[in-house]
Amino acid sequence: MKLRTFNAPRADIHLIEGGSGPDLFFLHGAGGITADSPFLAALAEKYHVYVPLLPGYGESEECENIRTMLDFTLHCHDIMLALDLDKPIVVGHSMGGMIAAEMASVMPNDVDKLCLISSAGLWLDEHPIPDVFAAMPYELPELMFHDPVAGGAIMTAGADFSDPTFLQGFLVQNARQLGMAGKILFPIPERGLSERLYRLKAKTLLIWGESDKLISRPYADAFNKAIPGSELVTIPEAGHMVMIEQTSAVVKAIGKFF
């Protein structure tokens, strides 16, 4: 996967791109993504993958003009148009799923294949989503992974949250990313998407880890109920970061559905 920069109406875009096959437009979650992601590499074996980094992620600059849910939605749609993508498979994880679902609802004729992986965007009072903005770094693996020990090692690349040097860098990066993500995820990750899902026309696949502790199974069922004709695939031994813990199962589910 290669990283390149190009211009879009609202901000300069840092884009991860690679692979060959049908076009797939991937929107990352609040934790970001990197060009060396094994999940992206697996997708690139079957698809031409385009992964824009939101402002504040990677080396990209923050953008004051992107403030609201509509701003995020139009920004990502602008990127898709700037890349001259004609109805790619749109895949979004967590926060990226929230944006992808908004795109498919606001511009229903431009998105006809949609995959939401552990998507944010809904709120159920009886199943509140944990506040990741208040979580300590060492608490995140338990929320994100089926296997928090292995997940923590992935998050820290083998380092330790008790290492002051690593922790300082992690906190700075996390602050940049969550500063951007917080515009649509804080104080709760809900901006009225449930009122717009009726407009969605896309063939929709929902993928959820069976052990997701962040956005739990009732949210998968709520999306499945709200989106006509959608299909839900649950994957065992996987938490919120299902595409990291069970990469091949996620890629297989996408390939089988589309």
Image: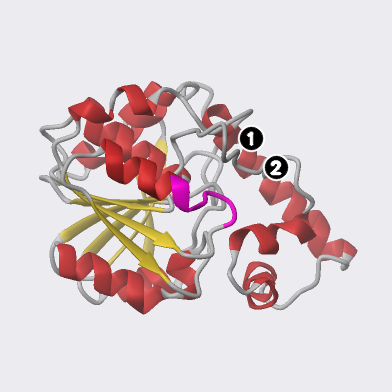
Relative image position of residue 85 (x, y in whole percent): 15, 46
Residue under numbered circle 2: 175
- On screen, 5 above or below 255? above
Look at the image and say whether residue 101 sits in the magenta stretch: no
Q: Is residue 127 left or right of residue 195?
A: right
Disc 2 on helix, strand or loop?
Answer: helix
Relative image position of residue 87 (x, y in whole percent): 12, 45
Residues 51 and 205: in front is 205
C-alpha separation, residue under disc 2 versus residue under disc 1: 6 Å
Residues 10 and 194: in front is 194
Residue under numbered circle 1: 179
**Dividing the image into 4 quarters, which one contains the C terminus?**
bottom left
Q: Residues within 10 Å of mark 1 (few under 14, many from 20)?
A: some
Contact, mark 2 vs mark 1 (Cβ under 8 Å): yes
Which segment is the magenta one?
A: 213-218
Relative image position of residue 232 (x, y in whole percent): 29, 57
Does residue 7 show up? no
Specify the amino acid type for callout 1: Gly
- On screen, 5 above or below 33? above
Q: What is the magenta segment's predominant secondary structure? A: loop
Quadrant of the rendered image containing residue 38? bottom left
Specify the amino acid type for callout 2: Ala
Does residue 178 show up? yes
Residue plotted at (13% across, 36% down): 201
